[in-house]
Image (cartoon, rainbow, N blue to C red):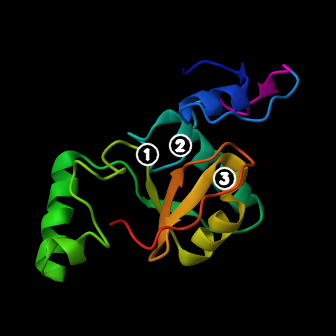
Amino acid sequence: MGGWSVLLLPALVGAALGGLAAPQAAAAPIPLPVPIGTGSSTGTEGLDPLLAFAYTMAEADAAAVGVPLSITSGYRTRAEQQQLWEEGLATYGSPEAARRWVLPPDESTHVTGHAIDVGPREGARWLEANGNRWGLCRRFDNEWWHFELVTAPGGGCPPLLPDAS
């Protein structure tokens, strides 16, 4: 997808979200400041291109209003996620308790490039309040740092889940 300087963002995001239709607007292309896949923020390597782009746009807007925002964890390999899972099992003592905070590789959205953890807390609060402008939503009540691309830009975020389990 790199190299595009103009595209229909609502249609692209709607298609990427499995058919969640973005509001139908006039067919005028939306000029983008950078093509998807280029000029992305630090930490977006390995992420789904639409998530990387949405986060890059959000980070730029946060910076414009003086809010620090960065990715603390994005894409993870299966081996990295397995190590986190094993550490979670050791820390929490049982799979049920560990699943509140970490998932095995076959279930983690980090392994598929569809999740980011952000910081600092001030940035995460800003992203929770503003992220839906790009389709970014906080997902878990117990994880103030975890965000995914789960709605069309400007759409409402789904209710928080209690935890990852």
- Secondary structure of residue under mark 1: loop
| Rendering quarter of residue 31 | top right
The picture places residue 2, in percent across and down from the top left corner, at 55, 21
Q: Tell me the distance, in whole angstroms, between the alpha carbons under discs 3 and 2.
A: 10 Å
The picture places residue 5, in percent across and down from the top left corner, at 70, 21
Furthest toward the bottom, the residue is 92
Which amino acid lies under the numbered mark 1 shown in the image of this protein? Answer: His
Q: Tell me the distance, in whole angstroms, between the alpha carbons under discs 1 and 3.
A: 16 Å
- Secondary structure of residue under mark 2: helix
Q: Mark 3 points at which residue?
A: 58
In depth, the one of 10 and 63 nearer the eye is: 10
Q: Is residue 54 above or below residue 159?
A: above
Specify the segment rendered in magenta: 27-35
The picture places residue 101, in percent across and down from the top left corner, at 31, 72
Total residue callouts = 3
Decide whether the magenta segment is chiefly helix, strand or loop: loop
